[in-house]
Amino acid sequence: MNSYIESRVLEIADYMIGTGSTVRAAAGVFGVSKSTVHKDVTERLRRINKSLAEQVAAVLEVNREERHIRGGRATYLKYHSAEAQGA
C-alpha cells in the first residue's frame, strides 16, 4: 500500500473517531468520495491497525443506528421551512 494512502486512512480514522462524523462528512473534509472513505475505514484500516478499525466500526455503527433519525429530521425541516415561507 502506498504511504500516502496509508497516511490518508489513518487521518480519516482519527478524524472520524474524534468527531464521530459520518462517512459523507469525512469525505467532504478530506476531498475524496464516500466510497473511498468507506473502503479506507472498513478494509484498508483493518490491515493497518486493527484496534483503530474497531473504534471506527463503533462510530459507523452509531451512525447507522441514527440514520433514520437524521433522515426524518431533514424531511421535517424541509416541509416545515416550506410552510413558513408560504410555499
Image (cartoon, grey):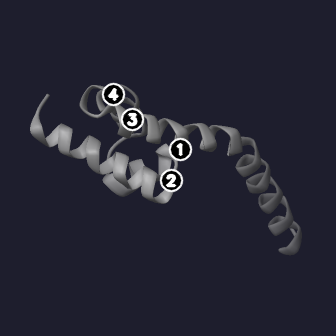
Question: Residue 49: which quarter of the image?
Answer: top left
- Give the left or right position of residue 4, taking residue 47 as reference: left
Q: Amino acid at mark 1?
A: Val
**Numbered disc 2: secondary structure:** loop
Residue 16 screen position, x and y as percent:
43, 51
Q: CA distance from mark 3 to mark 2?
A: 15 Å
Q: Nearer the viewer, mark 1 or mark 2?
A: 1
Q: Amino acid at mark 4?
A: Arg
Residue 37 screen position, x and y as percent:
38, 39
Q: CA distance from mark 4 to mark 1?
A: 15 Å
Q: Amino acid at mark 3?
A: Ala
Q: Which residue appears at 27% of the width and 25% of the height?
A: 47
**Numbered disc 3: secondary structure:** helix
Question: Residue 1: which quarter of the image?
Answer: top left
Q: CA distance from mark 1 to mark 3?
A: 10 Å
Q: Which residue appears at 34% of the width and 48% of the height?
A: 12
Which residue in the protein does label 2 denote? 21
Q: Which labelled disc corresponds to residue 59? A: 1
Tags 4 and 3 touching, CB below 8 Å: yes
Tags 2 and 4 touching, CB below 8 Å: no
Residue 10 screen position, x and y as percent:
27, 45
Q: CA distance from mark 4 to mark 3?
A: 5 Å
Q: Is residue 10 above or below residue 47?
A: below
Question: Residue 35: which quarter of the image?
Answer: top left
Q: Nearer the viewer, mark 2 or mark 4?
A: 4
Q: CA distance from mark 2 to mark 4?
A: 19 Å
Q: In the depicted view, which residue is nearer to us: 51 or 69?
A: 51
Q: CA distance from mark 1 to mark 2?
A: 8 Å
Q: Residues within 10 Å of mark 4 (few under 14, many from 20)?
A: some
Q: In the depicted view, which residue is nearer to us: 16 or 77?
A: 16
Q: Which residue appears at 13% of the width and 42% of the height?
A: 4
Which residue in the protein does label 4 denote? 46
